[in-house]
Image (spheres, rainbow, N blue to C red):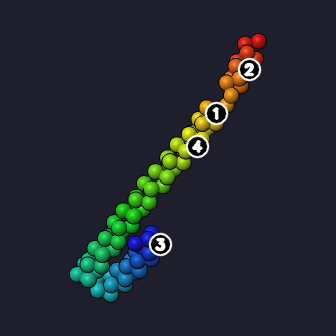
């Protein structure tokens, strides 16, 4: 399930639980069962969110590695004379 779908289901289940709790009492079996269903939805939401955050972290890491590789190869392909000329200019 997507995060948006879970958010919708959580809000609907919360409203349902409140309605049952108001009419049948907070300690009724139906309210407790609805609360347990809400807990499952919240756990699913947290799991999906955690998976999403892990994928984002991996994607960001890969982008940083790509950027480092790109700069490394740009420097690697610079002519040797570039480094020699810059070094001699710094010595003066």
Q: Which residue sits at x=49%, y=52%?
A: 59
Earlier along the polypeptide chain: callout 3 or callout 1? 3
Q: Residue furthest left?
A: 29
Mark 3–mark 1 contact, CB under 8 Å?
A: no
The first of marks 3 and 4 along the sequence is: 3
Which residue bears the numbered disc 4? 67
Please report contact status of discs 2 and 3: CB closer than 8 Å, yes or no: no
Q: Sort mark 3 into few (<14), some (14-19) or many (20+) by Cα contacts within 10 Å.
A: few
Q: Earlier in the sequence, mark 2 or mark 3?
A: 3
**Residue reaching furthest to the top:** 92
Q: Between marks 3 and 1, how big is the CA–CA gap? A: 47 Å
Q: Which residue is labeled 3 in the image?
A: 4
The residue that label 2 is drawn on is 85
Task: Report which residue position mark 1 lands on.
Answer: 77
Q: Is residue 27 left or right of residue 64?
A: left
Disc 4 element:
helix
Give the spatial CA distance, label 2 vs label 1. 16 Å
Q: Mark 4: few, some, or many residues within 10 Å (few <14, many ≥20)?
A: few
């Amino acid at each position: 399930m997507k995060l948006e779908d879970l958010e919708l289901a959580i809000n609907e289940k919360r409203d349902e639980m409140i309605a049952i709790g108001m009419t049948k009492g907070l300690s009724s079996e139906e309210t407790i069962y609805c609360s347990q269903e809400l807990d499952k939805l919240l756990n699913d939401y947290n799991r999906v969110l955690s998976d999403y955050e892990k994928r984002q972290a991996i994607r960001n890491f890969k982008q940083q590695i790509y950027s480092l590789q790109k700069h490394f190869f740009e420097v690697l392909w610079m002519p040797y004379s570039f480094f020699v000329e810059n070094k001699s200019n710094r010595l003066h």
